[in-house]
Amino acid sequence: RAGCGSGLYAGELSTANSGGFSSVLIPTPKANLPDARGLWIEYKSDGQQYKLQVRRSADSDVGLLSMFTGGGNDGVVYQADLPGPDQTWTTAFIPFQNFRPSWRGQPRSAPDLTGTQLKSVSLMVSKLSADGSPNPSFRPGRFALRVRAIGAYY
């Protein structure tokens, strides 16, 4: 939801039925940014730890349609914990080498992330941190993350 110069990623989390996570895909054109050093994000947390996620076009195709047509949702995603979780506007610069390859919340081996073949960017709140360990600030219930901008830096 957009408004007041920022986007709002909000909802309600439950740990019932193997829950404990939520993510939202940010419409992103596929990008080939070989000189980029990483991504930056300007955000305001509600006090929980959030993750920035990136998928590469070289990894398995994912999406709602492929989940229901047998394509699965099993591609590697690169995750980085956002610094914080203070409740003030923060700009974080996250080098590509800080993104950890993950599959369903667990660390995996995969090629290092670079600015080439970027397919999508998403945000996540989860009971797990990017390294697969428990997220110390996770709490079931309502969550809200405001985002003003996301981009690449050189």
Image (spheres, grey):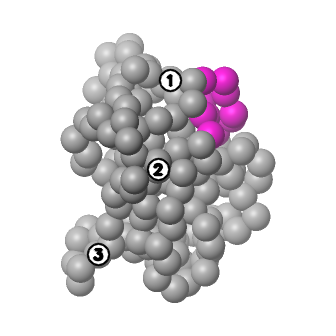
Mark earlier in primary sequence (2, 1): 2
User: Which residue sits at x=23%, y=84%?
Assistant: 4
User: Which residue sits at x=46%, y=48%?
Assistant: 37
Residue 126 coordinates in the image, percent (x, y): 60, 54
Of badges 3 and 1, the one in the foreground is 3
> What type is the residue that disc 1 sits on?
Asp
Is 35 part of what is drawn in magenta? Answer: no
Q: Which residue is mark 3?
A: 6
Mark earlier in primary sequence (3, 1): 3
> What type is the residue that disc 2 sits on?
Gly
Crowding around mark 2 (Cα neighbors within 10 Å: few <14, some 14 to 19, many 20+) is many
Mark earlier in primary sequence (3, 2): 3
In the displayed structure, 154 sits above or below 91; it is above
Closer-to-camera residue (71/57): 57
Kindly state the secondary structure of the residue where label 2 is placed. Answer: strand
> What type is the residue that disc 3 sits on?
Ser
User: Which residue sits at x=53%, y=44%?
Assistant: 96
Q: Which residue is mark 2?
A: 38
Q: Which residue is mark 1?
A: 74
